Amino acid sequence: MTSGVRQSLLNARDLERALADMSQAIVEFAGGTDRLLLVGVQRRGVQLAERIAHIIGSTHNVEVPRGAIDITLYRDDLRAVGPRPLVGETRLPGEVEGRCVVIVDDVLYTGRTIRAALNELGDYGRPDRIGLAVLVDRGGRELPIQADVVGKAVEVPRGDHVDVMIRELDGRDAVDIVVGLGSG
Amino acid sequence: MSRLGLGKDLLGLEGLSADEIRLILDTAEPFKAVSEREIKKVPTLRGKTIVNLFFEASTRTRTSFEFAEKRLSADTVNITSQGSSVLKGENLVDTARNLEAMRIDMVVMRHPSSGAAKFLANRIRSNVINAGDGQHEHPTQALLDLLTIRDRLGRVEGLKVCICGDILHSRVARSNIWGLLTLGAEVAVCGPLSLMPRGIEELGVRVLRHVEEAIEWADVLNIMRLQLERMRAGYIPSLREYYRVFGVTLERLERAQKELVILHPGPMNRGVEIDSRVADGPHSVILQQVTNGVAVRMAVLYLVAGGSSDLAVQAMGAARDEAE
C-alpha cells in the first residue's frame, strides 16, 4: 500500500464503546473500585484514564483516583534517541501502597514503555497488584508483557503507525492506521 | 542555532537563545519532583561516568552537582586541586586526557582562569559543563537564579532585575546579565565604581549609583557576594563602610514599601552585603535557590548528555503551539 494511506480502525462511536467495555473490565479486574488507582501514561494515556475514571465514577457513583506517569527518565533507549525528549510530569495521588494500580495507555506495541512504567511505579512504592489496560494492542512485542484489558486487538505490521486521536488533544475521537509511517 | 549551548557542552549563557534557556528551565520542572520523592533517584544516566574537576574551592556548587548526578544514577568522581591557583594549559589538557583514557563521559569543571571551560571543551570528546571559570561565566548559577525568579513572579520577561555588589569580578553577575537580557528582563547593576567594569552600559544594562535607587527601581535584587580579599586589594575602604553605603538592609527595604524579591548566590557575608534580617526575611528566596540548583543541574546534565538540543527545542515549540 502507498505510504501515508489512512485506514480507519475505530471511529468516535467505536472508541466510546471500547472505553465503556474497558471500564467495566477494569472494575472486574480490580475486584471493585475500593483500591483502584488509574495511572495514565503521558500523554494520551492520561486523557484515556481520565475518561475511564469518569465512566466508572458515574456507573458506580464513586470518585476514582487517577494519576499520570511520564516514563522519559526510565527509557532504556536514551543513548539511542540522541536529543533529549521533553520530560513530562509524573503525579500520583497519595500512596500506591496497598492499591490495585491499573496503568492506562493508548497503544501497546513493543512493551518497553510499560517496562519503564513498572520500574517507575516501583520507585513510588509497592502496590498490591498492577494491571495494564490499553485502547489498542497492535502486537509486535519485544518483551514478555501483556495487557489485562484491551479495547481493540489488531495485528499491525512493523513500519505502520497507529494514530490515536482524542477529543481533548486532537479535536476528535478516532483511531487510524497509517501505512508506512514508522513505529508507534 | 548556537553551538555554544546545549550541543556537547554548557560553557556559558552568552550566545544561548531564549528558547534554549527556556528549554533548560522547563526541563528543570519535572526534576524538582524527583527530589521530593521517597526514592530520590531515576535511572536516566545509569552507566555514565562524570568527573567533577574543581581547581577552586567550592562546597555548595560541587555538592549541588553531586546530588544532581547521583539522583540521575550517574557514577561520579570528585577531583579537587587546590594550592596552585593557576594551572598551565598543558597541565589541564594532560589531566583531561588522562581522565578520557579512563573512558569518562562528562566533566563538570571549575577553574580560576576565564575561558578554561571552552579551552577544555575544544580538546576532549566528553561533555563539558562549566561550573565557573575565572571572571567569565557560571551558567548553572544564573539558570537557577532565573528559575527561582520565574517560580516566585511567574515570568522573567519585563521584570526589572538589579545585580548588586562586585560586578567587576563576578562570573555570576555576567551569566545573569546574559540570561536576563536574553529572556527579556530589564537589567541594572549597582555597586562601588571601583568594582564596576568600564563600559558595562554597552551590554544594555543601566548603572545605578545608590542602593536606594536600586531598591526603588527593581522588582528583584540579586546581591553578589563581596570577596573579602577585595578590601585588602584596595577596591573598597572597609567592610563597615561597604555595609553603610551598599548593604541591603531592612530599613532600606522598608522605606521603599514594596514587595522585592531578594536573591543571593551564597555564601553570604551577613552584615556586609546583606542584612541578616533581609536574608532570613519574607523577601528572601535564597534557600529556594539552593533547592532549584539541584533541579537545574539535573536538567543540564540530562540535556547535555543527549547531544544537540535542536529537536528538543522544536518539540517544545510544537507543544506550545498545541497548547495555544
Image: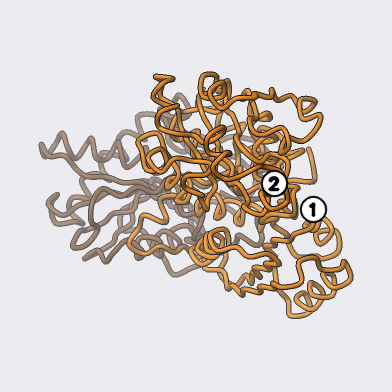
Chain colours: A brown, B orange
Residue that mark 1 sits on: B114
* Left or right, B6 with reference to A43: right
Q: Chain of mark 2?
A: B
How crowded is the residue under tag 1: few (<14 C-alpha within 10 Å), some, or many (20+)? some
> Which of B26 and A123 lies nearest the eye of the viewer?
B26
Q: Chain of mark 1?
A: B
* Left or right, B207 with reference to B66: right
Q: Is residue B100 above or below residue A7?
A: below
Q: CB of mark 2 within 8 Å of CB of mark 1? A: yes
Q: How many marks?
A: 2
* Left or right, B141 with reference to A121: right
> Disc 2 and disc 1: Cα gap in Å?
9 Å
Observer able to see residue A177: no
Circles 2 and 1 on the same subunit: yes
> What residue do we see at 15% from left, 33% from top?
A58
Query: Which quarter of the picture shows residue B47?
Result: bottom right
Indicate the position of residue B174 as horizontal and vertical percent values: 70, 40
> What residue do we see at 75% from left, 76% from top?
B99
Q: Is residue B79 above or below residue B293?
A: below
Q: Amino acid at mark 2?
A: Arg
SS assignment at label 2: helix
Residue B182: which numbered mark, if any? none
Q: Is residue A130 above or below residue B152?
A: below
Observer able to see residue B194: yes
How crowded is the residue under tag 2: few (<14 C-alpha within 10 Å), some, or many (20+)? many
Indicate the position of residue B271 as horizontal and vertical percent values: 47, 44
Q: Amino acid at mark 1?
A: Ser
Of the residues under marks 2 and 1, which one precedes in the sequence? 1
Indicate the position of residue B165 as horizontal and vertical percent values: 62, 38
> What residue do we see at 71% from left, 51% from top?
B10
Residue B171: which numbered mark, if any? 2
> Which of A153 and A128 lies nearest the eye of the viewer?
A128
